[in-house]
Image (tube, coloured by chain):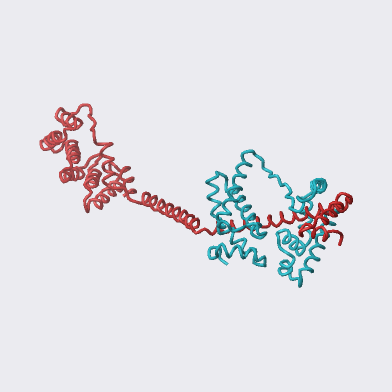
Amino acid sequence: MSNLEYIEDYFKGTPTPDETTSFEERIQNDPSFAEEVAFYLSGQHAAAEMANDERRVRFRELNFNHRSAQPAKVVSMRRVVIYAAACLFLAAVVMSWLFFQPVSTEKLANQYIDSQLTTLSVSMGTQDNMQEGLDQYNAGKLEESLKTFESIYKNDNTKDLAERYAGIAALRLQQFDKAISYFEDLSTKNLYSNPGKFYVALTLMKRNQAPDKERAHMFLKEVVDQNLEGKEIAEQWLKKM
Amino acid sequence: MHSTSITDTDIIEGLRRKDNRHVEYENALYMRFAYFIEEGRHKYSVNYEDAFSAYSDAVITVINNVVNANFQERSSLKTYLYQIFHNKCVDQVRKNTTKKNEMHHGFVLTDALNTMSDSSKTIIQQLIEKTDFDVLRKRLSQIGENCKQMLLLFADGFSDKEIAGMVGFKTAAVAKTSRLRCMEKLRHMYKQ
């Protein structure tokens, strides 16, 4: 078996000085032997490196499995998933609640009052006392304006506009019963454009007490069915209520 | 075998026994102090891969030193491994700083070679420098599983008696003869 055993015995053993001398003489005088020595050492080195590389691969696998199996990470990942799912669920609930939740009738009424009834338009040719009531109303003097409109209406109950304004002033003053009374009376009158039932509904929505919502719904439906003044807004509110 | 249920002594003795269970003890050693990786990562500001490599190399060094009786047990296994790991991390930082991605794989001369005269040593060194290690490794991987196992075990410090026990030969002499035949076969394959 060539010289490999001899070479190995030399390196693995404890050569005597004579053995070392003989070994070195062969290295220096026999290129083929020197090449075998070099190959033996290279082969040992390559094998050792390969063994270590195989360990590195094994350790990498261990490391991967260890990291994958770490409870803390699993829990944290699980928590992330749970939190994400919980957030999505909550978002869905909130969105659906916002989407399907009926809008407060009082809120709808307030929006309408704020946008449409904080000032009343002053028409040309309006009678002086009616003008006075409107000026008081638009100046925020609601109680004074109510008295003015009531005075006009008591003196002449054909003054439908005074009744209407008296109802609106009462509504703004949160005198709901009085406002409803004026608006219900107004609704019975045969006018070309009668907002009476719409205003009754508006007042009920603003008051927002136990049966008010149902009654407001009923009045709004009548406004729509009978094509009365305020129909378009009534339709929108009915969808939201 | 669970890595946390065995002691340093178990690991050291398990590695030194050099039997079929040596892989288990190597793995146990690796897992026992694997938390060094995260520590090293933060302490030396290296990335995870670098810390992992440093730790793997440190564990391999410890294994070799334990197997070859270079570990004197003057310190605990943990202290010993950590010191080597520290040095590997410093090497890693240095390598990153100097942007030398290729570590120099200098051939480690055996003690026996160091006892030779300079003229003999020079001849062998020059011949080794001509070795194409990529080809040699490729041939080693192609030589067959039994041969490869014997050559790797021997290079790892296992004796022929231990190899005989692991591979299934009756005597150390048979193991040695078989192993040297494998070495000869490797040489022929390399030359082709």
Residue found at x 70% / y 57%: A51
Locate residue B122 relative to residue A104 in the image: left or right: right
Task: Please state which of residues A117 and B184 is positioned toward the viewer in this rendering.
Answer: B184
The image shows residue B156, relative to residue A102, as above or below, that is below
* Residue situated furthest front in the rendering: A17
* Chain letter matching colour cyan: B
Task: Please state which of residues B44 and B101 is positioned toward the viewer in this rendering.
Answer: B44
* Residue situated furthest right in the rendering: A29
Residue A96, percent across and down? 39, 52
Splitting the image into 4 quarters, where does residue B104 fall? top right
Splitting the image into 4 quarters, where does residue A15 fall? bottom right
Residue found at x 45% / y 52%: A84
Locate residue A150 relative to residue A225 in the image: left or right: left
Residue B56, percent across and down? 62, 53
Locate residue A44 relative to residue A147 in the image: left or right: right
Residue A160, percent across and down? 18, 38
Residue A108, percent across and down? 29, 44
| Drawing shade for chain A | red
Residue found at x 81% / y 66%: B177
Q: Tell me the quarter of the image containing the N terminus of chain A.
A: bottom right
Task: Please state which of residues A226 and A180 is positioned toward the viewer in this rendering.
Answer: A180
Task: Please state which of residues A218 and B146 is positioned toward the viewer in this rendering.
Answer: B146
Residue found at x 53% / y 50%: B39
Splitting the image into 4 quarters, where does residue B34 fall? bottom right
- Total marks in image: 0
The image shows residue B99, relative to residue B64, as above or below, that is above
* Residue situated furthest bottom in the rendering: B170
